[in-house]
Amino acid sequence: MIWGSELAKISAYLGAGICVGIGAVTTGIGSGIIAGEGSFGVVKQPKAQEQIFRTMLIGQAAAQTAGIFALVISMLLIYGIPYDAAGGWFKAAAYIAAGLAMGLGSVGPSLGAGYAGSQACKSIARMPKYGNSIMGNMLIGQALAQTSAIFALVVAFLLMYSVPNQPDNIVTGRIIIKSLAFIGAGLAIGFGTLGPGTGIGFVAGKASDMMGRYPNEKSKIMRTMFLGAAVSESTAIYSLVIAFLLIFAVK
Amino acid sequence: MELTLAQGIIKASALLGAGLCMGMGALGPGLGEGFVAGKACEGIARSPENASLITRTMLVGQAVSESTGIYSLVIALLLIFAVKI
């Protein structure tokens, strides 16, 4: 083998950079739009400023979750994995794929959670009386949006810790097949969580908005939100299945 | 079974393609279905007496939107299991 442990280091450091780099972009955007609507809400409804401020902070913390997942994966890629020469191209590909999976995977959920939080702040500024039910709905919606980030986290962990070392007597073709299958798994779950995360966030945002306008229809709005979010989640589950197949079922 | 470099690259590209296919293919339906559900929440809040009608329309719309996700799933499974080298 030409490369020793350098190969694993190169790919792990590259993966760590990609992961937290992409992950930070939309986490920042998501918490920014919450803060924007929160500030605007304080201007419109100064009497409810404490409630709006609290909702803004809690919403931002929830929107940051996916960014924190990306940070954890980057830290682990830098400090928490063995850089054995025996890992070869298998491990190298898996480390980059883990970075891609979590980096791209945090884009959708944090955008979605950001939209949900911003609509909740807007809604509380309009109707401070129903603040508690709006904030509860926002938190449930953000949790639903974050589920797809958790799928990405699971795939990233599997890519980092359950990929076998490259066997010695293996033809070059097999090495390329396995390596690209790992990268494919990372891309599948990374892009695959983008749509569902953003979509569920849109549902949660609209539901929080409407809960402030029509508080008597709370149960109907929530039921529709759950149903719609579950259907929207289905494509993330397809992506998870394809990622698992690409990691474990490719010979 | 020994395989040549070219055969390996064919199979490897098919697997990378499967990942890209399912990943990008899940993006659109997820976003679209979320938009449908968001608007349905809005509609039900505005006219709750039509809740069942709106829910039905939402589910039919989401099913149509879901179809491209299922196309991607089928193509990804074909690329993983049915590609001949």
Image (cartoon, rainbow, N blue to C red):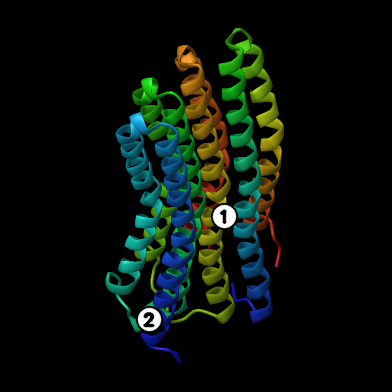
Mark 2 Cα shell of 10 Å, populated few (<14), some (14-19), many (≥20):
many
Q: Quadrant of the N terminus of chain B?
A: bottom right
| Of A251 and A178, the residue lying toward us | A178
Q: How many marks?
A: 2
Measured along the vertical axis of the image, is residue A63 above or below residue A82?
above
**Residue visible at 38% across and 77% down in the picture:** A87
Q: Quadrant of the C terminus of chain B?
A: bottom right
Measured along the vertical axis of the image, is residue A102 above or below residue A7?
above
- Marked residue chain, label 1: A
Disc 1 marks a residue whose amino acid type is: Phe
Q: Provide residue A140's location: percent of width, then percent of height.
A: 39, 32
Task: Answer whether labels 1 and 2 touch (C-beta < 8 Å).
Answer: no
Q: Provide residue A148's location: percent of width, then percent of height.
A: 46, 45
Assign a secondary structure to mark 1: helix
Same chain check for tags 1 and 2: yes
Task: Identify the residue position indicated by label 1 in the image.
Answer: A191
- Per the rendering, the mark at residue B15 is none
Seen from this angle, which residue lies furthest bottom? A2
- Marked residue chain, label 2: A
Determine the image quadrant of residue B79.
Answer: bottom right
Task: Identify the residue position indicated by label 2 in the image.
Answer: A9
**Residue visible at 46% across and 46% down in the picture:** A36
Measured along the vertical axis of the image, is residue B10 above or below residue A65?
below
**Residue visible at 53% across and 22% down in the picture:** A224
How far, Cα to Cα, is label 1 from label 2?
25 Å
**Residue visible at 34% across and 47% down in the picture:** A61
Q: Provide residue A100's location: percent of width, then percent of height.
A: 49, 64
Residue A114 showing in the rendered view: yes
